[in-house]
Amino acid sequence: MINTKKREITPGDFGLHGVGPGSCGLYAAIGDVDLMASIKSAMELQERGTNGAGIYIRGIYPDMKEFYAFHVMYLNRDIANELEQLITGHRLGVRHIGEMESLVKPAIYRQYALPELRRYFVTPPTSDEMMRRHYTTNPDVYMRRIVEKFNLRNIGKARIFSSGKNVGNFHTAYDLATTVKTYGLEKYADMNVTAVLTHMRWPTSIVNEGVWYGIHPIGFINSHIIHNGDLSSSPSNKQGVSAAGVQSMVGTDSEAMLLELDNLLIERDLGYQQIEWAMCQMYPQEEAKLPPETFKEYENLLRNSPEIARFKMSGPSSFVSIIRKNGISRILSGRDRDGLRQLWMGRSDDGKSVIWSSEEKCIYQTAFLSGKNYKSINCEPGRITVFEMDDHGNLNGVFGETLQ
């Protein structure tokens, strides 16, 4: 645990070159999820991840599930009082429902150096108003543009770091135990939680705005990711995202991966095999082994869309992402083609739960704490796995699964 004496975060906390020691601690669970078992299992990775810990939890606002839950961090209370009126006064372009709520108890601010953390439940305006403001009648598209607008206009002052329906991101610049304590996450233990994404260690590519802007899980509306690694393809990824006309808000390589996956799945409506081809592009000797028709399809995808060709994931990397489309959550996971980062996957014997972790021991720990049996495997390099999950947590393994 972090020392309870309040202390400001300084550049020294990020290491000599802005990057702390160690590797990312990555843990994800979907389906029939035991929240506290998942959190305790993820804590086994703390020694890898040093500080900067975040958790995404799905299913925590069942009574407000029709509204978007904005979690907002403000630099300080004065800035919160200044900018909050944009939301509560309906000046941002959304309708605020109920009252502003603090994400943490007042006593927490006396223990840790935190931004001002507040929560708002909001809904988009009428279709006519959405069209007038942002030329769309799709609520998710409209709300994403609202989040982008707010975050880009308030860099260094405030950030909407969670904005989906019935989900929440929770971040601190300390360890995972502190994140759990800060937000009192035990209160969600008895809820019907259907997904958890946990990540430890602040990002390898820290942006100028500081650690609070890059802590995982990174997300917007109903798309989220946790990522372990440092992409050597980061310049290519950023160029591809920019060429595709996609707006970044954080600026890290991890965010670029999420934007790419979201673009391929939602905007371009590509199939899972095509997404794998884009993210895990083949070596020439692998291409040569493809059947002629398959090679033609592969080549057309990458040659006819130069921006997609830049979406490739190169360098040590593994990820788990959750992207909701047409009422179904798609859980996409994968490893770099050279297998430089491990990604262990486990599935319970009853088929109702799936776990990913950067270390296999977390799967065994979850099995012990939850009373379930799991089969585990180290995911195949250069491949992705996709599960589809409904709002009740029912799973359908649809692509690339090697555990039955």
Image (tube, helix red, strand yellow):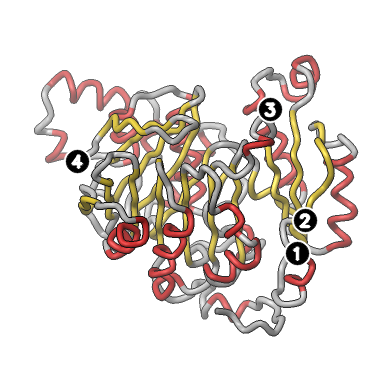
Task: State the image coordinates of residue 97 (x, y, percent, origin top left).
Answer: 81, 35
Q: Distance between the residues labelled 4 and 1?
A: 44 Å
| Residue that mark 2 sits on | 102
| Residue that mark 3 sits on | 142
| Mark 4 and mark 1 residues within 8 Å of each other at the beta carbon | no
User: 18 or 29: which is nearer to us?
Assistant: 29
Foreground mark, 4 or 1, reads 1
Q: Is residue 302 visible?
A: no
| Mark 2 and mark 4 residues within 8 Å of each other at the beta carbon | no
Q: Earlier in the sequence, mark 3 or mark 4?
A: 3
| Residue that mark 4 sits on | 402
The quarter of the picture where the N terminus appears is bottom right
Q: Which of marks 4 and 1 is nearer the N terminus?
A: 1
Q: Which of marks 3 and 1 is nearer the N terminus?
A: 1
Dot 2 amino acid type: Ser
Task: State the image coordinates of residue 133 (x, y, percent, origin top left).
Answer: 78, 24
| Mark 2 and mark 1 residues within 8 Å of each other at the beta carbon | yes
Q: Which of marks 2 and 3 is nearer the N terminus?
A: 2
When asked about the image quadrant of residue 344, the answer is bottom left
Q: Which mark is residue 105?
A: 1
